[in-house]
Image (tube, rainbow, N blue to C red):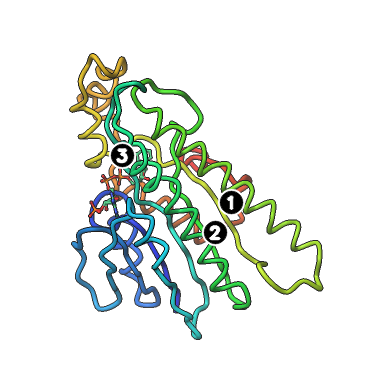
Amino acid sequence: MNYYYITGTSRGIGKAIAEHLLDNPSNKVIGMSRQKSIEHPNYHHFFLDLTDAQQVSDFRFELHGDAKRIVLINNAGAIGFIKPIGKLEADTIIKNYTLNLIAPSILTNEFIKCYNTLDTEKVILNVSSGAGKNPIDGWAVYCSSKAGIDMFSRVVDAEQKVRAAHPQESIHKGFHIFSIAPGVVDTEMQNEIRKANANDFSRLEDFISYKAKNELSSPLTVSKKYITILDDMSKIKNVLSSIKDYE
Ligand SMILES: NC(=O)c1ccc[n+]([C@@H]2O[C@H](COP(=O)([O-])OP(=O)(O)OC[C@H]3O[C@@H](n4cnc5c(N)ncnc54)[C@H](OP(=O)(O)O)[C@@H]3O)[C@@H](O)[C@H]2O)c1
């Protein structure tokens, strides 16, 4: 059996990945989000608010003795309030970093802690963003949290390589980690971006026009690409990449 822990399965990219995986009876999906929208015998849901660091810290992965592969997909994320720095509330900043950066960091740490001695394929996929590489005004917390998850992924990958060079050290080895951006996808997040105030966001018209010109990918298309990549990881050349690199 393959086990996929996925955050943000109630809608958008996370839901599409979960539903696609559930088409295969060898997969079990464990989803985490505040709402549940999937009913399936191989689906289990945890109602978690990932802006609450305590709820994230209390989450425990299960040991799966029959696992052929265990995957953590840190997908849940939010753009947060679109406003320039100087116009945000402190609590908004804390919650957005917690959801986009702290929760995936805590979950990855627990994932590696839990499965370090398990001799199976272990993968962490972080759903990153081009916004982690390019500054976008009004998105400071989102951009920096995605830049953070990219560097976090690179460090975890470097740690795995250091450990692989020491065969006598049997712990914390054998994990693959990738941070892959999905491109611009037609989800609720894009809807929220289009509702931003033009005074707080110079690129508003660009995002309205992506939708008007039908330039957004569908969550289904993107989810299939993520699964194809996960099913043949030899295609992945770098820790950081974009879905577009595999076309
Ligand atoms: N759409 C794009 O164009 C795009 C581009 C680049 C990167 N991304 C990234 O792709 C990922 C998925 O985004 P999406 O476009 O699919 O967004 P979405 O449709 O808004 O879905 C976001 C998912 O995250 C969950 N989530 C949000 N806040 C949460 C919280 N406090 N606790 C638990 N779960 C929470 C939501 O579940 P609940 O509301 O039920 O909690 C939902 O399932 C994100 O990391 C995003 O940054 C998206």
- Residue hosting label 3: 91
- Residues 247 and 12: in front is 12
Task: Give the side of residue 166 with respect to residue 179, left or right.
Answer: right
Residue 58 is situated, as x and y percent measured from the top left of the image, at 39, 67
Alpha carbon separation for disc pair 2 and 1: 6 Å
Residue 208 is situated, as x and y percent measured from the top left of the image, at 22, 23
- Which quadrant of the structure image shows residue 85? top left
- Which quadrant of the structure image shows residue 207? top left
Q: Identify residue type, mark 1.
A: Lys
- Residue hosting label 1: 235
Q: Secondary structure at mark 2?
A: loop
Alpha carbon separation for disc pair 3 and 1: 40 Å
Q: Residue 138 bears which disc, if any?
A: none
Q: Residue 232 bears which disc, if any?
A: 2
Q: Identify residue type, mark 2.
A: Asp
Q: Identify residue type, mark 3.
A: Asp
Query: Tag 1 or tag 3, which sits nearer the N-term?
Result: 3
Q: Residue furthest front?
A: 90
Residue 148 is situated, as x and y percent measured from the top left of the image, at 52, 40
| Relative vertical location of residue 78 with respect to residue 41 in this rendering, above or below | above
Task: Give the side of residue 156 with respect to residue 135, left or right.
Answer: right
Q: Of circles 3 and 1, which is in front?
A: 3
Labels 2 & 1 near each other (Cβ < 8 A): yes
Q: Residue at x 44, y 73 (%)?
A: 61
- Residues 46 and 75: in front is 46
Q: Residues within 10 Å of mark 3 (few under 14, many from 20)?
A: few
The N terminus sits in image quarter: bottom left
Alpha carbon separation for disc pair 3 and 2: 41 Å
| Relative vertical location of residue 7 with respect to residue 89 in this rendering, above or below | below
